[in-house]
Amino acid sequence: MTTLRLHTRYQNSAGQRVRIVLNLKGLRYEYVAIPSLSSPDYRKINAQGLMPALEIDGRVVTQSMAIMELLEELFPEPGILPADPLLRAESRAFANVITSDLHPINNNRIRRYLGDVLKADEAEIRAWYRHWLSEALTSLELQLTRQTTRFQFCFADRPGLADACLIPQIDNARRFECDLSKYPRLLAVDDECRKLEAFIQAAPQAQPDYPVS
Ligand SMILES: N[C@@H](CCC(=O)N[C@@H](CS)C(=O)NCC(=O)O)C(=O)O
């Protein structure tokens, strides 16, 4: 039996993607809460010092997209990509807008650099965040509204890779009090996903290290 250990933290949107995919596939895994990203111990697991990292039978895989693709290859059922090759490409493109274009410029270390090094104030950092979020979500909303078939989720009538990437981003957007009313199609997908245990159990507030107030 394969042993899976996910190094993550409750508020780790790249890790939340992976948690969703693990749950969609019904895979049991050990949740390893990361106490410090810069600790030498964690750097031994992920030299980049970023979350998440998946230990699989003692070997480590980093980068959420690589992890999700590996899980799809090792555990193909249920699949997280549509059967049709063009739809598969479209759903990967949708996911890439989030994982390659949006998240890398809006995540914590970028915001920290803006504040600590470039001396941007809180309002400027929020403006940065909201600008790039709005650019990305506008394009994702268009991608979905231009579809000739309307699915229950982003690219199928069952949730997959695109949904796993979208929902953590919507969580972040709400945390940053962004106006999401301009994205009704994305919100409709969000509503569908939030009914499912796979998404509920992957959410920040369901994680063992979520702070108790
Ligand atoms: N491209 C990476 C991004 C990983 C990443 O940036 N993770 C963030 C959290 S969502 C992180 O570890 N941030 C640490 C920090 O900002 O200090 C992936 O998809 O796994």
Image (cartoon, grey):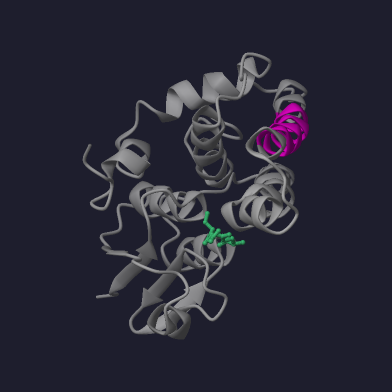
Residue 152 shows in the view: no
Taking 97 as reference, is 200 above or below it?
above
For the N terminus, give its image quadrant: bottom left
The residue at the point 68 percent across, 15 percent down is 182
Q: Quadrant of residue 84?
A: top right
Q: Give residue 52's position: percent from left, percent from top.
A: 46, 64
For the C terminus, give its image quadrant: top left
Taking 50 as reference, is 114 above or below it?
above
Nearest the eye: 164 or 204 = 204
Q: Is residue 160 left or right of residue 5?
A: right
Q: Quadrant of residue 129?
A: top right
Q: Give residue 17's position: percent from left, percent from top.
A: 48, 50
Image: magenta residue range: 126-140
Write down which quadrant ligand 1 falls in: bottom right
Specify whether residue 139 is painted magenta. Answer: yes
Residue 98 shows in the view: yes
Q: Is residue 141 left or right of residue 60?
A: right
The residue at the point 49 percent across, 32 percent down is 175
The residue at the point 62 percent across, 13 percent down is 181
Taking 137 as reference, is 18 above or below it?
below
Nearest the eye: 57 or 202 = 202
The residue at the point 73 percent across, 21 percent down is 145
Magenta segment's dominant SS is helix
Q: Is residue 103 left or right of residue 61?
A: right
Nearest the eye: 138 or 44 = 44
Specify whether residue 106 is painted magenta. Answer: no
Q: Give residue 46's position: percent from left, percent from top.
A: 49, 78
So how many labels did they put on this image? 0
Q: Give residue 206's position: percent from left, percent from top.
A: 27, 42
